[in-house]
């Protein structure tokens, strides 16, 4: 077998290894210690190394982003040597930071071969107008149109009152040289109309950025990427809680609030405030002016979109659950109320249904599943549990109404995944004593979604709860007791916690979690059934959403939230919605693909679906009524 | 020769007259007295009769409008009998009223064969939407689009944020029956996009008017016609002084005011207030609500258009005299600030140049000269003296910068044609004593344009002024004297006038009037020269503008303001601008014709034209240096 030379940066000398050896094995051979908390199963991401040079094949990239891979990162336990290589072993802190914080803007990969001249709807033109004279008394606007036609081939230029009010003075100020910013649906056809969005006196420097923003309005968090449309480069990434949270945790309570007198305007104001503050922040970082932002692409669930635009959302909540609009026409920022250039194009991406919104259409684009040969299951684990199953030939989708249990709501000591949240729990199978990890390494204040999943899996595997989710009250442990809400298990005693009170999980909490995970798993089942597939044949499971980032796949499988399949089929993608919005922002062909995706997705309404009800009832157990669906869990239980 | 039976309504019995007899002669034969103040020359319009039945040929319709003729009116002195006829002789008061006031709305003729379904851009659709159900969860907007496509063949319906905010609730309120108001550039092509402007719950009664307005923004007067777009009928006509007058009499002073800090917004506010008050007044008369008005077509000179839209007008005033925009794109009333439906289409008609605006493009349409075989001279006598010469094959135009002398400004005792203005003057050729007619039959306060023309003509014919316009100070009359402003002629003594002071005309006034009339006549000359015609070959002279309505053609020819040609070639058309706007409002083919007219008109800039200077100098005499051009005046002088 062929031998290759592998050099680890922190090793004294290179080693020689055969084709197919794992990088982690090679490291051991070179005397380099690499952390493998998950035991080399590719689940934890903590063995990430960077391939400086050479040939390494990644069998799985769970926990790595597109950018990570592009930047050379690989999981040592999941990558095999196929040629000579130079490998960098980053300090553990760097990996931790990579796993727990957002990427920085500079790391977002502009799609290869990206050509704004062909893909961007916005163009900046440098025009030289013929000055008027007594022999040429044409109006200013005709002069500008002529220059655009002759100098840039724009034959159908359109203007607005705002631009008419400015162009005469701008042209004179620039001594008949102007820089014009135009938008067109496409620049492929010579006769396609283009809109004049802005005009500056003189020819401004060519390297002046042309700003655009991609926005994802999440029910909980709003994310914004400030982008230079001329290069496609993301220059700032910012995120903040959606201020609407103050008026309701989930979409239902927000719709109710908005439906009350004046509530819609309040809701609209709150999300606009959130976005506009993010715009200020991103601009501060990038030395941009908000009024220089000339295009915004917006994704979000259907309720968020309606509330942003002040469109009544009441019908989303009431049977038969319809939106007012899924395909929103292009608008101006002034009309929408965004604090950017008032003439800026605001492109709200299309959704599919009341509970499968533009965030999912954008997410599907970000995953690339709509053009993949593989069967892909894409899920956005959250309140609504939107899920898409499909290939390049077909796409089916549903929303599971999981409820907010995994976001910490509806659980006595649940909380969001912020500082003080227990994010992972281990239970000693003999003593039933727990240990846990807290975000920020402080005293715990409660349990976030990943902590709850981890806790429930450990409780199940150690017998603290049974298959039906009932706490075993006969257990010989002070941790199990009767509380105000029935039986409960104590994770943290008062002296260990932030507020001095015990942190517990109750039977009621567990019921809520079971219903949430059953709804999500039942959704998968219905989608697979609808196309005559079994879940096991899915080639890849892509998990979007910020919550997904923290999920421990093994634990999620153990409670029956995720289907039981090999690790390498899973991948966490982070915020696919804002990434899809970014892709649509910089490339009108990708934008069009989102419209096609939204049109292609067949929506299955679960609340009117008998299969769903049966699948839901079967999934209300740990991990499932049908243990044959979860062979790895059965094996773990036997151990 | 054939004999015909003619019956006058106020005569005892019918008479028999030969073919070709004038109606006025027939009347005399029947013993019916018909007023002929102008001596049967067809100039004064006071011999108007109504042909109830029968065949009468009108040789000239000077002083009659399109509506008058359509309603059967004819000038007795200019019409000949060609068959049996029944003729009505209206009381003189009725004729007087007809001559001195605006027509009533009911008298405006809807173009023959007018078919709103083919000609109107606005349509009202009665749509029945499929209600949503658990089996059909399409969004509201798609539902509406589908109904429009299936029930009305509208394949490309577009909406706005305003409509998206309303449609869901409206559809439910109407139990999925709605009435939608749409606008399309044309309904000729099935794929043409249409905009949703308004939506009402349920099916509103079919005879509910669909309101539109045609507006002419004159420098002095704003006119507005409220129209039912479903029938084309004008339902109210209102007019009022342009409130901008308070900030300047003419366009130049208004531009200067608007160019000062904040002046543009003030100017915009003043004209919007004027229009919006007219809208209220017209709606009050017609039981309409301003917000029911869904379309507005606006004409006006280029300065008025710029000031209405808040577009800087400074360049109009400064060499090389260019506008910011001649072809203004379609806008919404909300953007413009009109107090009608905020989504209403506002169509500002196209102009040609700084001093040949949309009022002239609209006027040309109203005259029909752009499709006529005759050579037509169309003029809008006023400050700018816009003039168009042309046929169906060619159109040339110019603006004469006559100044406001004929509108009463720049003349010591000049005033507008309102109550108290001397509108006609006669001077006794022996005593040089004047007599005059005052509007409203009150004590005179000054002289309006027609009064000035009449006065100047009489002064010239009686020798009170010479060919050069100098007052003959040697005249044996107390009326001629030296005043503060040089030589002057007293028209009214203090005891006869409103303010107790003498009303005079001075040599300075006469100079101003001469320059004004010379500019206008020189304009005619340049236009005729530019196409190699002589003025005498012009087939018809059409005079628009409210000022034109009061001109005495004979006097105007005598001072050399109008070319010397037979009476029957002249016609007064009133406000051609608002009529053209009305035609464009109800018929998109006529609207397109205005664009063609504006594009076809060749604009001749007189300030850079040597021919103009020569023609102007030659026209600075009474009536002209070249008396061969004014044979009728030469003949009158000999008398």
Image: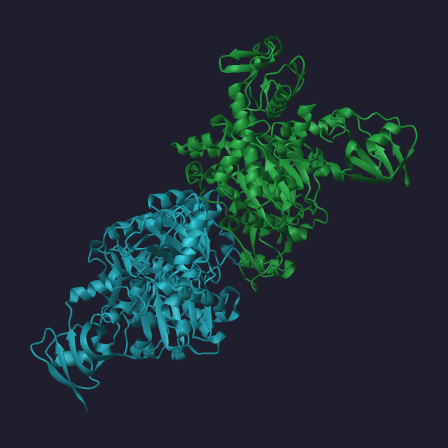
Chain colours: A cyan, B green
Q: Residue furthest bottom?
A: A1
Decide if residue A394 is in sight here: yes
Q: Is residue B202 above or below residue A7?
A: above
Q: Position of residue B461 (x, y in %)?
A: 64, 22
Residue nearer the viewer, B110 or B519: B519
Residue at 26% over, 70% down = A64
Q: Position of residue A19 (x, y in %)?
A: 20, 86
Q: Quadrant of residue A11?
A: bottom left
Quadrant location of the C terminus of chain A? bottom left
Q: Is residue A276 above or below residue B338?
A: below
Q: Is residue B376 above or below residue B31?
A: below
Q: Is residue A113 above or below residue B398?
A: below
Q: Position of residue B477 (x, y in %)?
A: 61, 10
A415 left or right, relative to B585: left
Quadrant location of the N terminus of chain A? bottom left
Residue at 49% over, 37% down = B303
Q: Position of residue B540 (x, y in %)?
A: 67, 40
Residue nearer the viewer, A430 or B289: B289
Tag count in the figure?
Answer: 0
Q: Quadrant of residue A184?
A: bottom left
A46 left or right, relative to B133: left
Decide if residue B288 is in sight here: no
Residue at 57% over, 12% down = B474
């Amino acid at each position: 077998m062929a031998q290759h030379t592998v050099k680890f940066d922190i090793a004294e000398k290179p080693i020689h290894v055969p084709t197919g050896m794992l990088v982690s094995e090679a490291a051991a051979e070179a005397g380099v210690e690499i952390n493998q908390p998950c035991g080399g199963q590719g689940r934890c991401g903590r063995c990430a190394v960077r391939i400086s040079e050479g040939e390494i094949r990644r069998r799985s990239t769970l926990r790595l982003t597109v950018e990570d891979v592009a930047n050379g990162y690989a999981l040592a336990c999941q990558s095999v040597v196929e040629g000579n290589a130079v490998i960098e072993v980053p300090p553990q802190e760097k990996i931790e930071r990579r796993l727990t914080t957002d990427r920085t803007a500079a790391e977002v990969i502009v799609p290869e071969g990206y050509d704004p001249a062909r893909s961007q709807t916005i163009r900046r033109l440098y025009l030289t107008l013929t000055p008027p004279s007594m022999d040429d008394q044409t109006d200013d606007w005709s002069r500008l149109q002529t220059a655009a036609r002759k100098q840039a081939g724009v034959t159908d230029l359109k203007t607005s009152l705002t631009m008419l009010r400015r162009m005469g003075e701008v042209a004179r100020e620039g001594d008949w040289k102007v820089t014009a910013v135009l938008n067109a649906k496409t620049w492929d056809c010579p006769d396609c109309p283009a809109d004049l969005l802005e005009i500056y006196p003189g020819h401004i420097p060519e390297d002046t950025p042309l700003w655009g923003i991609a926005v994802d309005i999440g029910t909980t968090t709003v994310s914004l990427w400030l982008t230079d449309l001329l290069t496609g480069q993301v220059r700032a990434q910012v995120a903040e809680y959606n201020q609407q949270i103050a008026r309701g945790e989930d979409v239902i309570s927000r719709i109710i609030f908005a439906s009350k007198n004046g509530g819609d305007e309040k809701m609209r104001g709150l999300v606009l405030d959130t976005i506009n503050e993010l715009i200020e922040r991103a601009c501060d970082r990038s030395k941009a002016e908000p009024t220089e932002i000339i295009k915004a692409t917006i994704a979000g669930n259907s309720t968020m979109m309606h509330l942003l635009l002040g469109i009544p959302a009441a019908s989303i909540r009431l049977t038969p659950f319809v939106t007012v609009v899924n395909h929103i026409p292009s608008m101006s920022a002034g009309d929408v109320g965004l604090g950017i250039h008032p003439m800026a194009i605001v492109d709200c991406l299309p959704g599919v249904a009341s509970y499968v919104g533009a965030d999912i259409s954008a997410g599907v684009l970000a995953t690339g599943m709509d053009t993949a040969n593989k069967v892909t299951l894409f899920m956005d684990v959250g309140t609504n549990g939107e899920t898409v199953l499909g290939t390049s030939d077909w796409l089916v989708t549903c929303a599971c109404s999981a409820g907010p249990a995994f976001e910490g709501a509806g659980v006595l000591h649940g909380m969001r995944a912020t500082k003080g949240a227990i994010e992972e729990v281990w239970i000693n199978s003999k003593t039933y004593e727990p240990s846990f990890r807290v975000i920020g390494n402080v005293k715990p204040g409660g349990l976030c979604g990943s902590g709850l999943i981890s806790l429930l899996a450990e409780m199940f595997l150690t017998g603290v709860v049974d298959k039906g989710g009932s706490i075993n009250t006969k257990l010989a442990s002070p941790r199990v007791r009767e509380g105000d809400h029935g039986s409960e298990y104590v994770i943290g005693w008062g002296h260990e916690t932030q507020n001095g009170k015990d942190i517990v999980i109750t039977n009621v909490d567990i019921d809520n979690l079971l219903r949430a995970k059953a709804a999500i798993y039942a959704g998968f089942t219905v989608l697979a059934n609808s196309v005559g597939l079994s879940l096991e044949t899915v080639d890849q499971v892509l998990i979007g959403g910020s919550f997904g980032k923290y999920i421990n796949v093994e634990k999620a499988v153990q409670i029956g939230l995720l289907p039981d399949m090999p690790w390498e089929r899973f991948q966490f993608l982070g915020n696919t919605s804002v990434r899809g919005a970014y892709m649509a922002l910089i490339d009108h062909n990708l934008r069009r693909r989102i419209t096609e995706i939204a049109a292609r997705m067949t929506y299955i309404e679960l609340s009117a679906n008998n299969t769903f009800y049966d699948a839901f009832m079967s999934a209300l157990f740990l991990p499932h009524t049908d243990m044959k669906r979860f062979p790895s869990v059965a094996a773990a239980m036997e151990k």
